[in-house]
């Protein structure tokens, strides 16, 4: 099967739409390609480390940002059933003017339990996201220490006690030329 050229030409956009202000553009820093160091923090206290990649682009006439979020990296993946926690996923981010916030939809067919819907806002120099996983579990995701060449990302989920949060994923991104 070939990928339709029309699709490849119609999806990406070279820039954000003009009516989305620079101030509202909290995710524009992601545009480009990134190398990721991923830390998956398991319930039993162990941590699994893997390398990943992130590729992000303006899409839909510059009205959304879409990414491809992959770990392990494509070069490190084996054929067959993905391991628990693997990501070969996409995120769609769209700005909701009524909320003055971004709607974030993360879709991971490799492990659907990690799929999520969130609302994102800037908090100081950071980006804070709140929402829930596919099974309804409340989550908090965030980008911290954002620079032009790096970022730290963290993901927490609410524990069964309904009060405490557990860190389950950290990403350390470094801009690349992939």
Image: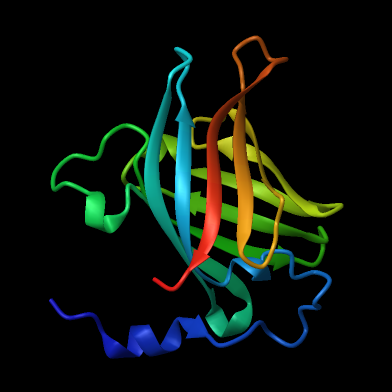
Q: Is residue 111 left or right of residue 151?
A: left
In the rendering, at what x and y percent does residue 165 appear?
66, 21
Q: How many marks?
A: 0
Along the viewing direction, whichever of 129 and 29 lies nearer the viewer: 29
Along the viewing direction, whichever of 76 and 69 lies nearer the viewer: 76
Q: Say which quadrant the C terminus sits in.
A: bottom left
Colour scheme shown: rainbow
Residue at point 29% right, 89% down? Answer: 5
Residue at point 80% right, 69% down? Answer: 24
Place residue 141 in its image quadrant: top right
Query: Does any portion of residue 69 appear in the rendered image?
Result: no
Along the viewing direction, whichever of 4 and 70 lies nearer the viewer: 70
Along the viewing direction, whichever of 87 and 171 lies nearer the viewer: 171
In the rendering, at what x and y percent does residue 61 appear?
58, 85
Place residue 125 in its image quadrant: bottom right
Residue that lies at the very extreme toward the right in this rendered image: 124
Q: Is residue 117 left or right of residue 88?
A: right
Q: Say which quadrant the N terminus sits in.
A: bottom left
Residue at point 59% right, 13% down? Answer: 160
Query: Does any portion of residue 19 appear in the rendered image?
Result: yes
């Amino acid at each position: 099967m070939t990928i339709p050229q029309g699709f490849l030409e119609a999806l990406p956009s070279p820039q954000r739409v003009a009516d989305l202000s620079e101030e509202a553009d909290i995710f524009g820093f992601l545009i480009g390609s990134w190398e990721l160091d991923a830390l998956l923090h398991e319930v039993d206290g162990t941590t699994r480390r893997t390398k990943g990649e992130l590729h992000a682009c303006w899409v839909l006439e510059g009205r959304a940002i879409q990414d491809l979020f992959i770990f392990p990296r494509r070069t490190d993946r084996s054929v067959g059933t993905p391991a628990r926690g693997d990501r070969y996923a996409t995120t769609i981010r769209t700005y909701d003017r009524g909320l003055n916030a971004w709607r974030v939809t993360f879709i991971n067919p490799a492990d659907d339990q990690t799929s999520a819907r969130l609302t994102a806002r800037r908090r100081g120099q950071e980006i804070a996201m709140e929402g829930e996983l596919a099974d309804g579990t409340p989550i908090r995701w965030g980008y911290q220490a954002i620079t032009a060449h790096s970022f730290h990302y963290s993901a927490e989920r609410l524990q069964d006690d309904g009060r405490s949060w557990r860190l389950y994923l950290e990403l350390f991104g470094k801009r690349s030329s992939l």
